[in-house]
Image: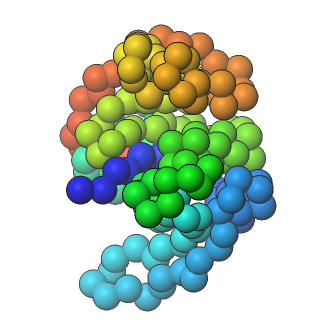
């Protein structure tokens, strides 16, 4: 079973702009070839990777099944744990650190984008930015959880103004897409 964190953004930035922001940030990610013209109308994909983390970027406009949290994303950025610790336990690269750094890079690069992060393929709300306000999940800031300052202090990597408050649970289901302009 893979370990994934899904970051969704409401932005006009292209897949390549998102990927380039991640690669140019100096957090250890490198560009990988795109996958385009996929069969059966599947979305085109852009990639970046490090030994610890693979990143897949795709359009995220399917409003048929998503959380009702006030953000209607146009892009989905999937951070996947490559389990580097199994083959090279002494390597300092770390999936969770790179995931948080990548999310911060994207939110700084695209400050007007609404966004949310859900973790571990379990729809656990971890972060929400809506209307310029960034909220980290209070549930995930508890001892032993993702944002626990005493665990690995991933919260210290959040270098944007934020608050820690309850998030979710978000109801999943069809949500109304924005009206065409």
Q: Position of residue 65 (x, y in %)?
A: 25, 47
Quarter of the image for residue 118 reads top left
| For residue 152, above or below residue 63 | above
- Who is closer to the viewer here, 66 or 20? 20
- The structure residue drawn at horizontal position 48% and vertical position 36%, both measured from the top left corner, is 116
Judge from the rendering whether residue 65 lies leftward or rightward of residue 151; answer left or right. left
Residue 174 position (above or below residue 150): below
Q: Is residue 139 left or right of residue 26?
A: left
Of residues 116 and 121, the one nearer the viewer is 121
Does the rendering let one see residue 53? no
The residue lying at 66 percent from left, 24 percent from top is 156
Say above or below: 31 vs 157. Answer: below
Whether residue 129 is visible to the viewer of this picture, yes or no, is yes
The residue that appears at 71% across and 20% down in the rendered structure is: 161
Q: Position of residue 142 (x, y in %)?
A: 41, 13
The figure's colour scheme reads rainbow
Left or right: residue 139 versus residue 158 is left
- Number of marks: 0
Quadrant where the image shows the N terminus: bottom left
Q: Position of residue 44 (x, y in %)?
A: 46, 76
Give how far across and how far down residue 111 sits, in percent: 72, 38
Q: Is residue 45 above or below residue 75?
A: below
Give the camera-side residue of 107 and 2: 2
Q: Quadrant of residue 68?
A: top left
């Amino acid at each position: 079973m893979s370990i994934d964190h899904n970051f969704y953004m409401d932005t006009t930035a292209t897949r390549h702009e998102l990927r380039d922001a991640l690669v140019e940030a100096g957090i250890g990610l490198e560009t990988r070839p795109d996958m385009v013209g996929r069969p059966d109308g599947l979305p085109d994909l852009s990639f970046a990777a490090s030994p610890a983390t693979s990143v897949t970027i795709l359009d995220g406009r399917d409003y048929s099944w998503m959380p009702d949290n006030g953000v209607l994303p146009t892009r989905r950025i999937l951070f996947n744990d490559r389990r580097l610790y199994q083959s090279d336990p002494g390597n300092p690269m770390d999936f969770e650190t790179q995931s948080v750094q990548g999310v911060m890079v994207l939110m700084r690069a695209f400050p007007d984008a609404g966004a949310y992060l859900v973790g571990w393929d379990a729809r656990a709300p971890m972060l929400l930015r809506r209307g310029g306000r960034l909220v980290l999940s209070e549930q995930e800031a508890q001892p032993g959880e993702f944002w626990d300052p005493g665990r690995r202090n991933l919260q210290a990597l959040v270098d944007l103004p934020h608050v820690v408050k309850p998030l979710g649970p978000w109801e999943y289901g069809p949500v109304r897409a924005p009206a065409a302009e």
